[in-house]
Amino acid sequence: MINVSNGVTEAKGFLASGVKCEIKETGTDFALIYSKEPAVIAGVFTTNVFKAASVKYNKEIINKNETVNAVTINSGNANACTGVQGDIDVLTSCNKTGDILGIDGDKVLMCSTGIIGQFLPMEKILNGIKMSINDLSANGGIAASEAIMTTDTFPKRYSQKININGKEVTIGGMCKGAGMICPNMATTLCFVTTDVKINQSLLQKSLNFGIQTSFNSLTVDGDMSTNDTCLVLANGMSNCDEILEGSKEYEVFEAGLAEVLKELAKQIAKDGEGATKYVEIKTINAKSYIDARNISLTVANSPLVKTAIFGEDPNWGRILCAAGRANAEIDPTKTSLYFGDVKIVENGEPVKISPKDAREPMLKKELTIIIDLGIGDFEATAFTCDFSYEYVKINAEYHT
Amino acid sequence: MINVSNGVTEAKGFLASGVKCEIKETGTDFALIYSKEPAVIAGVFTTNVFKAASVKYNKEIINKNETVNAVTINSGNANACTGVQGDIDVLTSCNKTGDILGIDGDKVLMCSTGIIGQFLPMEKILNGIKMSINDLSANGGIAASEAIMTTDTFPKRYSQKININGKEVTIGGMCKGAGMICPNMATTLCFVTTDVKINQSLLQKSLNFGIQTSFNSLTVDGDMSTNDTCLVLANGMSNCDEILEGSKEYEVFEAGLAEVLKELAKQIAKDGEGATKYVEIKTINAKSYIDARNISLTVANSPLVKTAIFGEDPNWGRILCAAGRANAEIDPTKTSLYFGDVKIVENGEPVKISPKDAREPMLKKELTIIIDLGIGDFEATAFTCDFSYEYVKINAEYHT
């Protein structure tokens, strides 16, 4: 996958780095995002009862502070189900980061991803903190996006420029997959930086909006992790006017942020563990958005649908069957189904079509399945991938 | 799997058969259960919106009639998403069966399992009806249990005798798996016959009770089918006194029926598509039964847990992680976890144990995982299996 964006270092005033402190056996595994000016911070987090130590810590900091300057991220160890020792380790790490950077410890956040139930190797972490601070650079977004990978096969970055009151501002981000991926929120780690000027509650509002159609519409395997986190940092360094609630500028920013989040979420689906195909499940003409989203996500989570897609088998019965258990309003006699442009089911009954024609869209690397409920005006799309031998292999062999 | 029971022909007055009418390419594919006397009928059915034609028909008949005499079952074709033609085909089949048996058409039920979205091959079905009536016999429960199989690798039967007021009565049954298996109800087809005397509402009540701890606690892949059906037929031919509501005899019968249903459900988990291990997920000391059941089923449905079990990897973090998203009350600091007898987690933190000792219970063919919430008095067990390459293979290659 060709990716020309620098991710979190596209926006003005942000530096980043990614280094190897040997938590993982191979590759870099410690990243740092740093803003030259205090950055307004917003976040959404896993709703799992077993929250990682860093998730609990970050939520506290965001409730207490309007701004932070730095976020460290380690891969290879989730620091989840690690009790009081886990909490202490996060505090120690953030204080150490603050010390070296010359800022307060509570201006630093920390995120972790990897194996659950092992204590952080603190000597390595402290080493990672030092090295990552030394390596900070204006194009470090690339190294950072590589250091947060676990079973990902490619780094994930995206950015775009938008126009706020005649001034160009930037929204850029990075994220990682690639298993234990399902709403809500957010699944996985995602970091977005922007140089707009905005207050904390409005930044949080825009994140809450954008997360619904991006990370909360994404599933690889239906498993929500203990560490899911999405953070947005806004440092105001573009010198554009402050974005105010109810303004046209807010609408532009909200749409821009949602777009960046969606493009990042799509990259995770494309890199789902063992995935051979990228799939969008689009439910249209539903009675409500919730109905449309429930159906799209239920179909996207069905192992029978996902294995059929892997087998390039136009087994539409499995798709309707999964839709039918989604707790949504459906009239079977008004439901139609398409593979790409090819109509397969019309008003609940199969269309007369040759098996070869039905299979044609399944052979491509990217597939859109459209479920037309024919009873309303709402739609929702879920982003997912197929389910292959390789998924089983990766997850049967992933250590402990 | 050695199975000494005759299944549906263990109880007095029931005949059955299983014949080959060539809906499937190999094996028998048409079964008939027949009661010499009208049998009181109870049933539970899929809650999927896309109900098979036969499900809609059977529900109507059971609402209208207290008794039936016969049930036909075909495998290889689900007759689901087949519109009006599907409804007509069920009616034609049941009337034909009634004609030959010399009873009214509405004294016959029909069940189907197999591929969704294709019309029933009616010539073959009508041939199957004739052959199966000719083959009816007092030990036909064995042939019937074989004829209802699809991707099952062994037929599933179970029966037991219980004592009602000093008289021995029998409850016997058969069922089929082996994919698209998840509550509620029931997943899959299950047929139980008994020679007790009981009225319809009480028989339905006992079935509603037994289904919760059996088929509604079972999952292979989280996919609920369009055809799920569990029927119980009671023909009264044991000549025991009628079982009355609120009596001690009712309690004995209810427990006996629940036991038969649970043993049948376990056989489905043992034969889950591609399964190499049978797994029970037991949640204990929960605040409520619903909490315990939600956790057990959420863990049992997690692809990450199931692939770890296939890989014989004691990856307990995935288990707690799945439990943590089950919408149940959990105090992480009071939660403990066991693989069989081996304690792995105590009060939310890992026990010091060698990887070899932790792995020991995973190497067996049958595994019990116990999640002790430590906050209440309720428990629930889910029946499931692991998730292997073979599951993907079976479902990627299963045709349309």
Image (cartoon, coloured by chain):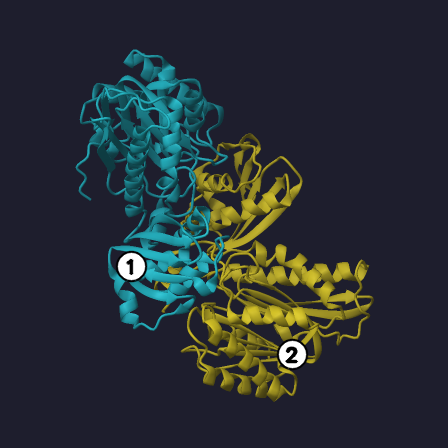
Chain colours: A yellow, B cyan
Residue named by callout 1: B340
For badge 2, the amino acid type reads Lys
Indicate the secondary structure of the residue bearing disc 1.
loop
* Vertical comparison of A27 with B83: above or below: below
Q: Nearer the viewer, residue A112 or A217?
A: A112
Position above or below: A376 against A367: above
Q: Position of residue A144 (x, y in %)?
A: 56, 76
Under mark 1, the amino acid is: Gly
Decide which of B6, A362 is in the foreground and name it.
B6
Q: Horizontally, is A251 left or right of B207 in the view?
A: right
Relative to A41, say whether B319 is above or below. Answer: above
Q: CA distance from mark 1 to mark 2?
A: 45 Å
User: Which chain's residue wears label 2?
Assistant: A
Tell me: A146 left or right of A63: left
**x and y percent of residue A40 in the render?**
70, 72
Front residue (pair B218, A306) = B218
Q: Residue at x 56, y 40 (%)?
A: A328
Q: Residue at x 57, y 72 (%)?
A: A57
- The image position of residue A201, as x and y in percent, is 72, 64
In the shown orientation, is residue A104 left or right of residue B247?
A: right
Residue B78 can be seen, yes or no: no
The residue that label 2 is drawn on is A107
